Amino acid sequence: MMNRHIFKFCVIGITALLPVACNDSENDLLEPKVYFENKENTFAIEDDHETMTFDLASRLSAMTASQVDVSYSIAEPSVVDEYNTKNGTSYEMFDPSQVKLSSATSVIPGGKLYADKVTMELTGLDAVEEGKSFILPVRVRSTSVSALPDTSIAFFILSKPIKILNVGTFNGNYVSVRFPAGTYFTSFTYETLIYLNSISNNNTVMGTEGVMILRIGDAPGTPKDYLEVAGRQHYNVSEGLKTGRWYHVALTYDQPSGKTGLYVNGAKWAESAWAIPGFDPNSDVGFNIGMLPGFQWGTRPLRGYLSETRVWSVARTENQLKQNMLGIDPNSEGLALYYKFNGTDVQQGGTIMDATGRINGTTNGIRIHTLATPVVVE
């Protein structure tokens, strides 16, 4: 039997937030216009839901004495392209053939602000893959009044959450990576999911020690629970990480602009400006994850779990970090290294293969731990 998920949703909001063009005449500002007040609406698709149903309701900026007719339609794919370009996202457009409106038209009665509700049903959601994200743009129009350009389209963003249950255990464990000869990162991103069982004075996350390394703490100089980048450049966040919970942490550097940021759970916790051309990840003691094996001033091990550990040759945007914390296509442009640490990274003879299929890492063995509940980043 088909599981039908009913989700009552009205696209409404606050009149005071209406965008106003500076060059509009006073009469134009007072003219009633139709619009959606909630421009972006994000929903998670649950495993057992084949359908989701929403109640659409557009509104007027001001009441009219006479009835206003409105119509709804699925916007063209170019609207999705524009949205992705503007927001640095990579959403796919939801298939319009899997969208059914109870009616393509509605009315706003005279003396009222809101249109009579129209039901929108999305089907085929049980076939959506974990980690896939889609966007559906719905446009409102009227022959009676004009529409507000910036809010005449409501975007419905739908994704099926990835459930991570298997993670890599780090407790004196490491992965050492030798990038292809000649590798030189100008812009770059480090990112990973991390769970700390305990925190020592210096905890290696990943990077090239003495050059560009992401770690937690450097006591007594930096509190031992502060995320920091160190090497030829140095700065840190000003709030500590806690044990016993999952975080997504990231370091980005955009070489053309010189902007760099430290992110926690997709939010920028610290930023700086650098004027460096880039770095060679193979320099000094090389690139390591989780520990610095044989390092003369201490191996600085991480004690906890890692998952979804990635290195990019581009600076990922804040939206991209937020959208892809739990998973990413291994063929994504600019992805240089990707360890999932979920058991699919086959370890044989002291080597581990990254998910892109390009680089073998050297390891002392990463034990895969199965969690009681999936990874949650709050």
Image (cartoon, rainbow, N blue to C red):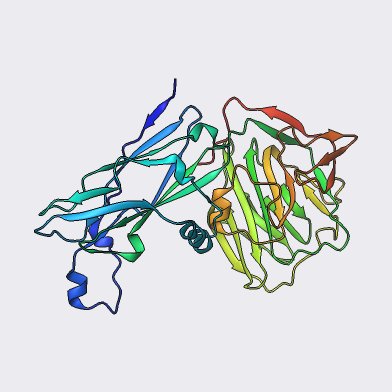
Residue at image position (84%, 58%) is 282
Q: Name which quarter of the figure residue 141 lies in.
A: bottom left
Q: Examine the rendered structure and indicate whether residue 152 appears above or below residue 378.
A: below
Residue at the image point whose x is 19% and y is 64% from the top: 32
Question: How far across and how far down the image is residue 200, in percent?
Answer: 69, 43
Closer to us: 102 or 228: 102
> Can residue 201 be seen here?
no
Give the vertical position of 375 relative to 185 (above or below).
above
- Residue 128 in the image, given as x and y percentages of width and height: 54, 37
The residue positioned farthest toward the top in the image shown: 1
**How many numbered marks have been drawn onto this rendered protein structure?**
0
Q: In the image, 69: left or right of 96? A: left
Q: Nearest the camera: 195 or 95?
A: 95
Query: Which quarter of the figure has residue 314?
Result: bottom right
- State left or right for residue 229 relative to residue 72: right
Q: Quadrant of the N terminus?
A: top left
On screen, 150 above or below 171?
below
What x and y, as percent, mark residue 261?
Answer: 60, 61
Residue 272: image quadrant is: bottom right
3 in relation to 264, above or below: above
